[in-house]
Image (tube, rainbow, N blue to C red):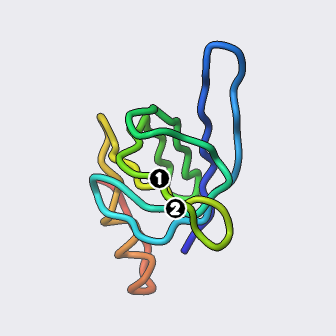
Amino acid sequence: MSRSPLSRRTDSHQTKETAVTNNISAKGLSAICKLSAEIGDRVKLACKEYDFYAIAIVRNCKPADNGNSIHLEFLENGFPMEKLYAERRGGSYAST
């Protein structure tokens, strides 16, 4: 699990928070957060650790023990899974 900042903007204000990811793939993630979001909302995601920034759409949001379990689908960028795999193998990642 890692922590990633999420933000959601409405017409009147922007909400930001750091979420704990539960599951991640190249196309999306699930996280536990306090962010109040509806299915179809767009959120901005930043994962500085992997140099990943994306806009995602909320595909599901349901109550969880520590807030909400939010499920996001990345709209344009895919998460760099090769960086995550390299870190877990104990190696470093070198982009080409």
Foreground of the two, 36 or 8? 36
Residue nearest the observer in this picture, 90 or 54: 54
Question: Image check: 76 left or right of 68?
Answer: left
The residue lying furthest to the top in this view is 11
Where is mark 1, residue-wise?
Answer: 61
> Is residue 24 depicted above or below 65 in this figure?
above
Q: Is residue 38 left or right of residue 68?
A: left
The residue at 68%/53% (across/down) is: 34
Q: Residue 15, position in %: x, y? A: 70, 34
The image quarter containing residue 25 is bottom left
At numbered mark 1, what does the secondary structure look like: helix, strand or loop? strand
Tag 2 secondary structure: strand
Q: Tell me which residue sits at (43%, 82%) in the image.
A: 88
Q: Residue at x 31, y 66 (%)?
A: 82
Q: Residues within 10 Å of mark 2 (few under 14, many from 20)?
A: many
Residue 14 — which label?
none
Q: CA distance from mark 2 to mark 1?
A: 6 Å
Q: Which residue is mark 2?
A: 69
Q: Position of residue 29 (x, y in %)?
A: 40, 59
Query: In the depicted view, which residue is nearer to us: 59 or 87?
Result: 59
Residue sitting farthest toward the front: 63
Contact, mark 2 vs mark 1 (Cβ under 8 Å) = yes
Image quadrant holding the N terminus, namely bottom right
Q: Residue at x 69, y 26 (%)?
A: 14
Position in image of residue 95 (x %, y %): 33, 55
Kind of residue sitting beneath label 2: Ser
Query: How far from the left and from the top, in percent, is residue 32?
Result: 58, 63
Measured along the vertical axis of the image, is residue 46 above or below residue 29?
A: above
